[in-house]
C-alpha cells in the first residue's frame, strides 16, 4: 500500500519514505496522520509504504527471531531480506524517494522495527517502535542491544513508546538506552499512561513523527519572536540538518509572507529572495508565489508582477503562479488574460491531483 504526498505530481522533488509494518491494520491511520501533519507544517511530506501481513500467524512468524521453544516464531530475517532486496528497490524505482527511509511498527511490528535497527546492513536510517513487544524471547532484546550501544554501532534516530501496560519489557529496554547510548545518538522514550496497548498506536505515531522533525512547525508569530529575516532563515537553515531536512512547505511559505508584511521587512523582499534562492533553491518558486500573493492583496500589483516574471519559466507549471497572474491582469482590467490564467490555474491543479480544498482556494 502506498500513499503519496499532496502535490507529489507538481514537481520532480524526491521525498523521505516511511515504511509501516502490519499495514493491513495500521496503514490507514498512519498515512492519514502523515498527510495531516504535513499539511499543517509539522513534518516534511513523506511517501508512506504499508507492508501487510497475511493473517495473525504470518504476523507472529515474520516479526520475530527464532525461539527454540516455539516454532511459531522466527522469520524476521526473511522479512528483513524481503524489505531490503525486493520491496525497497521496487519502491525506489517506482517513486521519487531519497535516501531517508524510516521504519515504523507497533507491538510485534515494534520489536521487528528494533530488530531491523540492529542489523548491520539495514536499509533504514530512522526507527519508530510503538509499544514494542520486548517481552518476546524472555526479554532478550536489552542484552542484544547492549553491545551495539556500547560499541557505538547505532547511529540512526529511534523513538520508543509505551502505554499503560505491564510486562512489555520496554522498561528494561529503556534502561539500556539510558545506560549505554552515546550522547550523539538521537533517541527518545515517551510514556502514554492514559492509553492502553490498543489505543496507543495513533498518539505514539503522532509524537514519533514529530520526533523526526523537531521544531518544524512555525508560524508568523513565532518568526516575529525569532527576530529579523536573517535570523528566521538561519532557523530554517539549521532545520536542514534534521533527519528529513527542510524545505518551505505551502504553510511555511504562507506564514513567511505574513511575517514579512507584519514585521515591515517587505521592502527588502528582493534581497530576501536572493538569500532564499541561495540557501533554499528548491523553495524559491513557491515562496515567490506566496509573496506575489501578498503584494496583490496589498494592491501593489506591479511588484507582484515583477516577482512572478522572475520565476516565469518554472512558475508556469504552478497553479498558484497562474492564479496570481490572473489577479494581476484583473487589476489592470485585462479580463481576457485574467480569465485565461484562471482557467490554467484550475486545469493544472486538477492535472496534478490537488486536494479539493486547494482547488477551491484557487477559485
Image: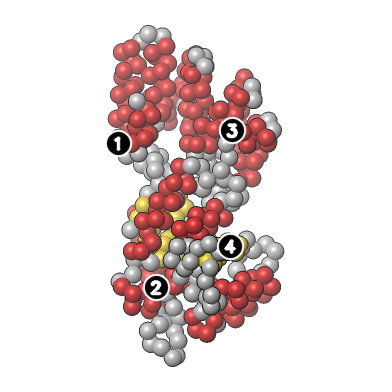
Disc 3 designates what residue? 220
Q: Between 362 and 25, which is closer to the camera in this rendering?
A: 25
How far separated are the C-alphas under marks 2 and 4? 27 Å
User: Which of the two marks, 1 or 4, is nearer to us in this view?
Assistant: 4
Q: Which image quarter: residue 351?
A: top left
- State whether residue 283 appears in this view: no
- State whether residue 138 appears in this view: yes
Q: Residue furthest top?
A: 333
| Disc 4 secondary structure class | strand
Q: Which image quarter: residue 338?
A: top left
How far separated are the C-alphas under marks 1 and 4? 42 Å
User: Which of the two marks, 3 or 4, is nearer to us in this view?
Assistant: 4
Q: Between 298 and 125, which is closer to the camera in this rendering?
A: 298
Residue in the image at 51% along x and 14% along y: 300
Task: Find residue 351 and name its label.
Answer: 1
Q: Give the answer, above or below, for where 243 lies relative to 340.
A: below
Amino acid at each position: 500500500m502506498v500513499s503519496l504526498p499532496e502535490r507529489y505530481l507538481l514537481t520532480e522533488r524526491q521525498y523521505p519514505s516511511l515504511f509501516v509494518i502490519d499495514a493491513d491494520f495500521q496503514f490507514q491511520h498512519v498515512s492519514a496522520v502523515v498527510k495531516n501533519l504535513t499539511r499543517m507544517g509539522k513534518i516534511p511530506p513523506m511517501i508512506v509504504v504499508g507492508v501487510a501481513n497475511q493473517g495473525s500467524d504470518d504476523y507472529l512468524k515474520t516479526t520475530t527471531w527464532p525461539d527454540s521453544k516455539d516454532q511459531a516464531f522466527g522469520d524476521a530475517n526473511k522479512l528483513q531480506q524481503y524489505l531490503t532486496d525486493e520491496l525497497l528497490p521496487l519502491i525506489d524505482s517506482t517513486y521519487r524517494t531519497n535516501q531517508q527511509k524510516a521504519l515504523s511498527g507497533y507491538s510485534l511490528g515494534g520489536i521487528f522495527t528494533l530488530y531491523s535497527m540492529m542489523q548491520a546492513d539495514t536499509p533504514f536510517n530512522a526507527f519508530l517502535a510503538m509499544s514494542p513487544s520486548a517481552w518476546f524471547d524472555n526479554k532478550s532484546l536489552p542484552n542484544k542491544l547492549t553491545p551495539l550501544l556500547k560499541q557505538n554501532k547505532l547511529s540512526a534516530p529511534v523513538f520508543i513508546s509505551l502505554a499503560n501496560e505491564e510486562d512489555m519489557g520496554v522498561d528494561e529496554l529503556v534502561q539500556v538506552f539510558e545506560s549505554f547510548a552515546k550522547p550523539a545518538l538521537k533517541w527518545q522514550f515517551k510514556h502514554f499512561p492514559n492509553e492502553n496497548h490498543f489505543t496507543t498506536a495513533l498518539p505514539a505515531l503522532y509524537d514519533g513523527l514529530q520526533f523526526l522533525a523537531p521544531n518544524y512547525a512555525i508560524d508568523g508569530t513565532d518568526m516575529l519572536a525569532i527576530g529579523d529575516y536573517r535570523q528566521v532563515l538561519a532557523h530554517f537553515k539549521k532545520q536542514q540538518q534534521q533527519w528529513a531536512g527542510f524545505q518551505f512547505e505551502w504553510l511555511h511559505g504562507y506564514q513567511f509572507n505574513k511575517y514579512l508584511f507584519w514585521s515591515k521587512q517587505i521592502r527588502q523582499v528582493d534581497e530576501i529572495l536572493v538569500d532564499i534562492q541561495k540557501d533554499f533553491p528548491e523553495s524559491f518558486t513557491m515562496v515567490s508565489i506566496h509573496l506575489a500573493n501578498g503584494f496583490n492583496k496589498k494592491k501593489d500589483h506591479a511588484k507582484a508582477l515583477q516577482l512572478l516574471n522572475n520565476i516565469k519559466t518554472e512558475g508556469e507549471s504552478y497553479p498558484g503562479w497562474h492564479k496570481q497572474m490572473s489577479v494581476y491582469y484583473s487589476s489592470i482590467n485585462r479580463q481576457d488574460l485574467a480569465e485565461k490564467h484562471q482557467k490554467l490555474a484550475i486545469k493544472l491543479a486538477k492535472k496534478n491531483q490537488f486536494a479539493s480544498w486547494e482547488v477551491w482556494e484557487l477559485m
